[in-house]
Amino acid sequence: MAKTVISAFDEFLKYSVNLDSDQTIKARASRDWLFDKIESFPNDNYSFPRLFSEKNIAFGSFARRTKIRELDDIDLMICLHGEESTYYEDSDGIIIKVSDSAQRLKKLCDDDTSNLNSKKVINAFVSELNSIPQYQKAEIKRNMEAATLNLKSYPWSFDIVPCFFTKPDILNKDFYLIPNGYGKWKKTDPRKDRDRVTEVNQLHDGNLLNIIRIIKYWNKRPTMPLMSSYLLETIIVNFYNSKTNSLSKFVDINIPEILNHISSAIFSSVYDPKGIQGDINSLLFTDRMKISVRASADYDKALVARDYEKNKNDQASIEKWAEIFGPDFPLYY
């Protein structure tokens, strides 16, 4: 319960939107422990591929600090040593050709070829994860791009994505190759997503992250079709990357303009900031229309809520914000 709009949003962010700080500390420690444990795989099993650990990277919304409650998954990429292997692009994915000297990788190729099978690489991780005593009661399986580790002791799971780091191409660009879910590989570069969020957040004096999180919470409410978290985050970061005036530290001041922007931006192409996937807005037109209508309606409500606050009517403002964010928004007292 809250007496002012400011305290209502502070409480809402702390207890309903942002991750619990104690849980975040435990999750990072658990992730770092897993990174360290995977380091031993090639020594414990001489068939397991060599690692290129300098290029390991945590990725996803947890790593970018844009994750909202509840913490359900943590993503990490484990880099393997290519051992002079090469790659080329095929019509349905990237093929990695394993060099004759890379005997460990050779065992994970398609039969009678030197084509590295990404499913077999993930299965190698699944096998080794099953050998860790601390994970004996965990559910461990291959899931498209990752080895998924569902823990019994924690509410979150780990998605462990094997990858390779490329040498610079003719444009002097390097990137990661990860499984495409069908046995081949595809390009990605989580460094660009991470650095872009950090740069735009710094541009706005550290106030970007809370607006990303609270709009992600708004997106998850069952009032409209769900946008993917990454699509929504990209729309928000694009918008604030183009703005010269800084975001306010008071999140409610920023909400009307981003809802208004989403109501129109959802109809446009949204290009992958990594320059790899192209247009990531694959929503149906009917879904875009429903999202736009909801964003416009909540934009109007946000303006009313802001007017109530300006006129010192915190109770009416809090009640109007609760219409936007739902029953978990603090009550006025």
Image: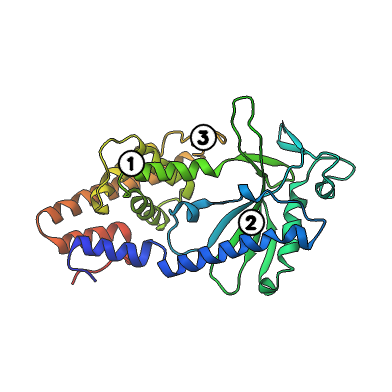
* Image x and y of residue 9, in percent: 26, 61
- The quarter holding residue 221 reads bottom left
> Of label 1 and label 3, which has the lower sequence position?
1
- Per the rendering, the mark at residue 279 is 3
Above/below status of 10 relative to 293: below
Query: What type is the residue that disc 2 sits on?
Result: Ile
- The quarter holding residue 308 reads bottom left
* Image x and y of residue 299, in percent: 27, 47
Query: What type is the residue that disc 1 sits on?
Result: Leu
Q: Measure the C-alpha gap from mark 1 to mark 3.
A: 25 Å
> Of label 1 and label 2, which has the lower sequence position?
2
Is 61 displayed left or right of 276 in the figure? left
Q: Which residue is mark 1?
A: 203
Which secondary structure lies at badge 3? loop
Circle 2 Cα neighbour tier, 10 Å, few/some/many (<14 / 14–19 / ≥20): many
Which secondary structure lies at badge 2? strand
